[in-house]
Image (spheres, coloured by chain):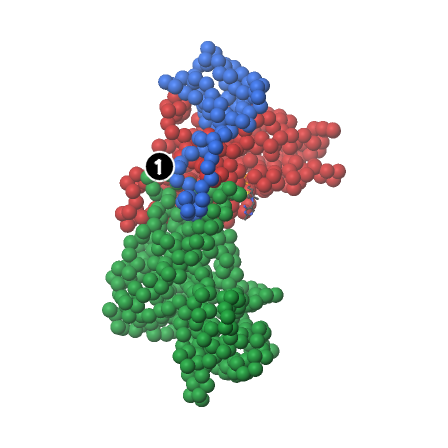
Chain colours: A blue, B green, C red
Amino acid sequence: MSKEIKKGWKEIPIGGLLLDAGNSREYETGTWRTFKPIHNAEKCINCYFCWEFCPDNSILIKDDKVVGMNYFQCKGCGVCAAVCPTKAIEMVKEEK
Amino acid sequence: MTTKYEALTGAEAAALAMKQINPDVVAVYPITPQTPIVMKFSEYVANGEVDTEMVRVESEHSAMSATVGAAGAGARAMTATAANGLALMWEIVYIAASTRLPIVMGLVNRALSGPINIHCDHSDSMGARDSGWIQIYSENAQEVYDNYFMALRIAEHKDVLLPVMVCQDGFITSHSVENVLPLEDAQVKKFIGKKNFKGLLTSEKPYTIGPLDLQDYYMEHKMQQHDAMKHVIPVIEKIQKEYAETFDRKYEIIEEYRTDDADMVIVGMSSVMGTVKDVIDMMREEGIKVGAVKPRLFRPFPAEKIKNVLSKFKAIIILDRSDSFGSFPPLYGEILASFFAAEKKPYIKSFIHGLGGRDTNVEMIKEVISELQKLRDTGESNFTIDYLGVR
Amino acid sequence: MAVILKNEINKQVPLNGGHRMCPGCPVPVIVKQVLMSTDHPKIVANATGCLEVATTIYPYTSWNVPWIHNAFENAGATISGVVAAYEAMKRSGELPEKNKDAKFIAFGGDGGTYDIGLQSLSGALERGHNFLYVCYDNEGYMNTGIQRSSATPIGANTTTTPVGKKSWGKTQPRKDLLSIVAAHHIPYAASVAPHDYNDSMAKSKKAIEVNGPSFLVYFSPCIPGWKIASDVSFELSKIAVQTCFWPLVEIENGEWSLTGDSKRIAEGKKEKLPIEDFLKTQGRFKHLFKPKLQEDVLKIIQNDIDKSWNFYKKMAGYTD
Ligand SMILES: Cc1ncc(C[n+]2csc(CCOP(=O)(O)OP(=O)(O)O)c2C)c(N)n1
C-alpha cells in the first residue's frame, strides 16, 4: 500500500474537495485477492470482454493486445475468467 | 445615488435585492411568509429583468440541494425559505456549509411547528445556529435590503467562503410596508463585483466534490470551517465600512441605541428592537436612562464585542424570540458564555417573547424596563428566565 | 449498432481502479458503459450509496470526470442545480469552451431512487432538465447492510425481511419504477442489463444525447447482498433477462418496445426460462428451495413475473 503522509488542515483544499482526478490509481486493492487471474496469451483472441467487464479496470492492454493484469489493483473477482470465451484466463490460488 | 424612497415590504426589499444581484440560479419552494419573495422574483424572471435560471423545485430539500449543485458548478446561487422549509432542507443546510459554498439564503423567520403556526419567532434559524452558516438578523426592510449585498460579499470573500442566512421577521418585517431607500442597479453591480470563486464542476480539471470523509481527514475539514468562522467578523467590519463609505449607510455588527449615559439596556435582535427603541424614547422623556443593544450577527457570535459593549452597564435584559427547552435561550446563553471570563459582569436576566407571532407590544417592553430597573437596583432576578406576555 | 470494443480500449475510462467496491461488483462496469457511450464531456452527480462511498474515500477519488455528491435522496435535485448553473453560465458567457457541450448524468442506487429519492427524481423529470438519471438497481440498501427497498423482489431474504419461522422473506412485489418514470412522459427511458453491452451502450448513448430528461434502470447484482460468487454478475444478468425477471424495455417518446433477448422471447425466437432458473442462483432465495421446496411461494413469484412480463409485452405491442 502506498504510504500516505496525512496532511494538516492548512495543507488540504477546503470543503473536502479532491483535486487530483482518478488518484485512486495509487491505492492498492490487490491485497484483497485470494485468487489470481493468469492470462494466457496463446489462447487469447483479444475480444476484450475481460476489459469490458473488469470492475477494477485492471486488464492491461498494449498495442491493442491484452498483455496481463494490473495486480496492484485486481481484486481477483474472477469476472475476466468467467466472461472469457476461450478460457484464456485461469484463476489460481493466490500465494501469500 | 438614489435618493428616492420606495414603499416596500421586507419581502419585496429582499426580492429587489435579489434582482439587483441578478444571481445565476435561484431554486425555491414556497412557504408562508417567504412566498412574496418567490412571487416577486418570479415576476422579475417572467419580465426578463434578471438573467437568472430559476428552478421551481418540488420541496425545500430540493431547493437547497439544487442550490448546492448550482453553487458547486460555479453559479451565484440563492434560495429563500422559512420554518418548516428550513427544517426540511436541514441535512443539506449543513452540507452547503461544509462544502464551503457561498450561498445566500433569505430566511423569513417563522415558528417551527407544532402546532403549526405561520407567524414569527426565531425557532427556525436558531435551530440551525450550529450548521456552519453565517446568520445575519435584520430589524427592518431597509436592513434586509442592505444586508443582502453585504451578505453576498461576505459569503464570497476568499477568507470566508461560507453560506449566509439573511434573516427577517415573518410578517412583521416581511409583510409590512416601509420606506426603503434602494441603490441603483449599477451601484449594486459595482459593489458586489464579479464572482471570485471557482466553478468546481466546470473547471478544466475534473474535481470530486463531496467525497466520503472518514476518521483520517474529517476533523481537518471541520477545523477549516472553524477557522473560516474566525475570519468572518473582520471581513464583515471591512465590508460594512466599505458600504458606509460608498453609500453613506452605516451598519455595525452590534448596534447601540441611546447607550451613552445608560446604566441598563435591553438586548435583542430583529424587529422587536424597533419597538424597544420607541419605548426607550418614551422612557427617556421620563428621565429613565435605558438604552438598547442589537447584535446583527448571531453566527459567528461576536462574543468579545458583546462583552465589551455590555460590561458598561449595571443591568441587562435579553430578549430571545425562541426557547431552548431545558437550557438557556439562544441569545441569553451566548451572552452568558461571553461574560464567563469577564471581571465585571452586569446583572443579567432573560425574557422569552413573541413566540408564534405573539405581539411584543409597547406595554410589554415597558414591563421589561421596569423589571430592568428592579434588576439594576436589587439584583434579585439575576440569572432568571421568564416568558414575556404569557398567561 | 454494435459497439466495437477495440475502439474503446484506448480511451480514458471514467472510473479508475483502486476504488473499494466489492470484488466482482458490476456497478463500475455500469458506470463505464454509460459514460463511455458518448464522447461528450460529462458531469456526474452521485447519490449516497455504495458507488459514492467506495469510489471517493478521501483523499482518493476514482473519478476522471467532474463529480458531485450531495446526499442520499437528492441526486435529481442536485443535478438540476448543476444543469441550471450551466444554462445560466452559458448565457453569461463564462462557461469554458470545453464544457459547452457537456452532458449531465446522475447515478443512484435503488434505495436512493425508488424510495427516498423518488420525489427529487420526479421533480427533476417533470421540470424537464436536460440530464440522464441512472439507477443501478441492486434491489436493496446494500451500503447499509442489505436492507429491503421497494426494489427488492418478492421472496428475497434481506436483513429487514429476514427469513424466519413465520417469514419467507419480502412479501411484496417490486415497484415498477420504469412505468412510474414513463408516466412523466420524458423523451427516453429504458431498462438495461449490463451483460448485453451493445444494448446497454446503445441505450446509454440515446439517453445521454436526447434533448430533455432521460432515465435508465440497470440490473445490478450485489455479491454480498444476493449471496452470489464474485464472478457471476454478468451471467446472472443474462439469466435475469431470459427468465423475464428483468425485461429489456425501451420507451422512446412514449413508444414502448422490447430489446435484446426480451425482444427475441416476445417474438418466440427464444425460450422464456422459468423463474427458478434465476432464483436458484442466489443465496437470498435459498430458503425457497431448502430445506424444503416452497412451491406455493415459487408460484406466487412466477405469477408476479408473468404479470409484469405480460404488461411489458402489451405495452410493446405484442399482445393487446
Ligand atoms: C437521509 C439518509 N437516510 C439514510 C441514510 C443511510 N444510507 C446511506 S446509503 C443507504 C443505502 C443506499 O441504498 P441504495 O440507494 O440502494 O444504494 P446501494 O447502497 O445499494 O448502492 C442508506 C440507507 C443516509 N445516508 N441518508
Type of residue at label 1? Answer: Pro
The local secondary structure at tag 1 comes to: loop
Q: Please report the residue visible at 51 percent of the width from the left and 26 percent of the height from the top.
A: A30
Q: Residue at x 34, y 50 (%)?
A: B197
Q: Residue furthest bottom?
A: B286
Give percent across and percent down for residue C165: 75, 38
B367 vs B261, nearest the viewer: B261
Instruction: Please say whether residue C129 is visible from this viewpoint.
Output: no
Residue C236 lies in what quarter of the image? top right
Q: Position of residue C207 (x, y in %)?
A: 41, 36
Closer-to-camera residue (B85/B48): B85
Crowding at mark 1 (Cα within 10 Å: few <14, some 14-19, many 20+): some
Q: Is residue C137 left or right of residue B200?
A: right
Quarter residue C305 falls in: top right
The residue lying toward the viewer, choosing from C33 and A73, is A73
Residue closer to the observer: B99 or A84: B99
Q: Quadrant of the N terminus of chain C?
A: top left
Q: Tell how many labels.
A: 1
Q: Which residue is mark 1?
A: C41
Which chain does the residue under circle 1 lie in?
Answer: C
Q: Residue furthest top?
A: A42
In the rendering, at what x and y percent does residue B375 appear?
A: 54, 80
Whole-percent x, y for residue C234 in the image: 53, 26
Q: Is residue B140 above or below residue C213?
A: below
In the rendered structure, the answer to whether residue B284 lies left or right of residue C229 reads left
Residue located 57% across and 76% down the image: B382
Q: Quadrant of ligand 1?
A: top right
